[in-house]
Amino acid sequence: MIVPRIGVYSLVIISSIWVLSSMSDSLRFDIESGHTKCISEDIKSNSLTVGKYSVINPNDGQPLPEFHKITVRVTSSYGNSYHEASKVGAGEFGFTAVEAGDYLTCFSAEEHKPATTLTVEFDWRTGIAAKDWTGVAKKGSVEVMELELKKLYDSVIAIQEEMYYLREREEEMQDLNRATNSRMGWLSLLSLLVCLSVAGIQVWHLKTFFEKKKLI
């Protein structure tokens, strides 16, 4: 199968954006007490993902207030739970995705009167961005150049896997388009037959009416 050159370049650009986006900085957001905020991440199957979260202490040097604790839950698009923590000020999770799709990390703040606002810092990384390169260098005594080459190699592998994934999605969309076009064709034929049948019945009815009136 020959892939058009433009299509390959497009896939490479999209894949590169995906790899770079997986290396984004941590996210900081606010939650009001009694409310829930969810963050979604599209993760492929067999991809490593890690996350770290913490509630920013409004009073430096003092313990985190009890009403600043949150409940965190990570679920897949199929409803399977991968991490759950209740009434915590900080935590982390890590797992290898078994199923592909959108994963949700939901943060819930406890009800409190008067209402207060919690600030949460969240760092979520997937794929090659989830690997601890510093740990790899320390454990293997890897030189800087060798470490950079290993990073580049894993980046290329991630781009290749993303290209295969996009190609599979494209084939699925083509199959869906063909099935839709086929159904629309049959629906158009059925509509034409119904219209012809109605027209025939109308002609027969008018002919019978005029014959009874002896107009023809």
Image (spheres, rainbow, N blue to C red):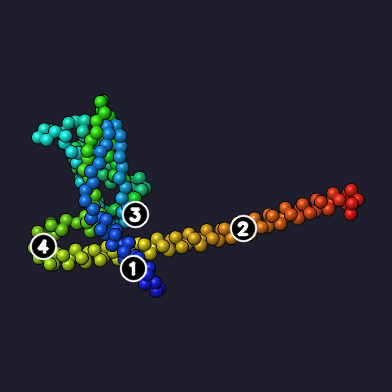
Residue highlighted by disc 2: 188
Which of the 4 quarters of the picture holds residue 19? bottom left
Mark 3 residue crowding within 10 angstroms, few (<14) / some (14–19) / many (20+): some
Which element is circle 4 on? helix
Residue highlighted by disc 3: 100
The numbered mark, 4 or 1, whose residue comes first in the sequence reads 1
Residue 180 on image: x %, y %: 52, 58
Look at label 3 and name its amino acid.
Ala
Give the label, 1 or 2, closer to the camera: 1
Give the label, 2 or 4, closer to the camera: 2
The numbered mark, 4 or 3, whose residue comes first in the sequence reads 3
Residue 21 on image: x %, y %: 27, 56
The numbered mark, 2 or 4, whose residue comes first in the sequence reads 4
Q: Is residue 6 above or below residue 127?
A: below
Residue located farthest toward the bottom when viewing the structure as drawn: 2
Residue located farthest toward the top when viewing the structure as drawn: 113
Residue highlighted by disc 4: 140
Look at label 2 and name its amino acid.
Ser
Residue highlighted by disc 1: 9
Look at label 4 and name its amino acid.
Gly
Which of the 4 quarters of the picture holds residue 60? top left
* Viewer-side residue, 41 vs 44: 41
Work out how far the residue at label 2 is from the one at label 4, CA to CA, in angstroms. 66 Å
